[in-house]
Image (cartoon, rainbow, N blue to C red):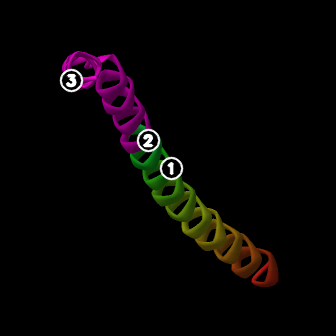
Amino acid sequence: MKTIFARLMKDESGATAIEYGLIAALISVALITGATALGDSLDSMFNALSGQMTTAETNM
């Protein structure tokens, strides 16, 4: 029984898979955060452009 437990404690393949999973999760969070920030920036830029076009249209 001790040898089975000792062999189980030495096995690191599961730990490696968990580490890769955590890395993938962190990369996903970073991509989502970046895409959200870019989307917010584009939204405000297009809203400003729309306002300028509306103002230019009413001044004609």
**Residue of label 1:** 32
Start-end of magenta stretch:
1-26
Q: Which of 2 and 14 is in front in this view?
A: 2
Assess whether mark 2 and mark 1 are in contact (beta carbons under 8 angstroms).
Answer: no
Check if residue 8 falls in the magenta segment: yes
Are circles 2 and 3 on residues that touch, CB within 8 Å? no
Q: Which residue is drawn at 33% across and 16% down?
A: 13
Give the dominant element type of the magenta stretch: helix, strand or loop. Answer: helix
Return the x and y of residue 15 as percentages of the image width and height: 30, 28
User: How many numbered discs sit on the rendered protein?
Assistant: 3
Q: Distance between the residues labelled 2 and 3?
A: 36 Å
Q: In which quarter of the image is residue 17?
A: top left
Measuring from the top left, give residue 32's x and y in whole percent: 50, 49
Q: What element carries label 2?
A: helix
For disc 2, the marked residue is 25
Bin the neighbour count of mark 1 within 10 Å (Cα to Cα): few under 14, some 14-19, many 20 and up. few
- Between 20 and 11, the residue placed more toward the observer is 11
Q: Left or right of 47: which side holds 60? A: right
Of mark 2 and mark 3, the one earlier in the sequence is: 3
Secondary structure of residue under mark 1: helix
Q: Mark number for residue 2?
A: 3
Badge 2: residue crowd in 10 Å (few <14, some 14–19, many ≥20): few
Mark 3–mark 1 CB contact (< 8 Å): no
User: Which residue shows up at 56% across the image and 69% down it?
Assistant: 44
Q: Which amino acid does label 2 sit on?
A: Ala
Q: Would you place residue 36 above or below residue 4 in this image?
A: below
Task: Give the quarter of the figure containing the N terminus.
Answer: top left
Q: Nearer the viewer, mark 3 or mark 1?
A: 3
Name the front one of labels 2 and 3.
3
Q: Which amino acid does label 3 sit on?
A: Lys
Please name the residue shown 22% across and 16% down the image.
Answer: 3
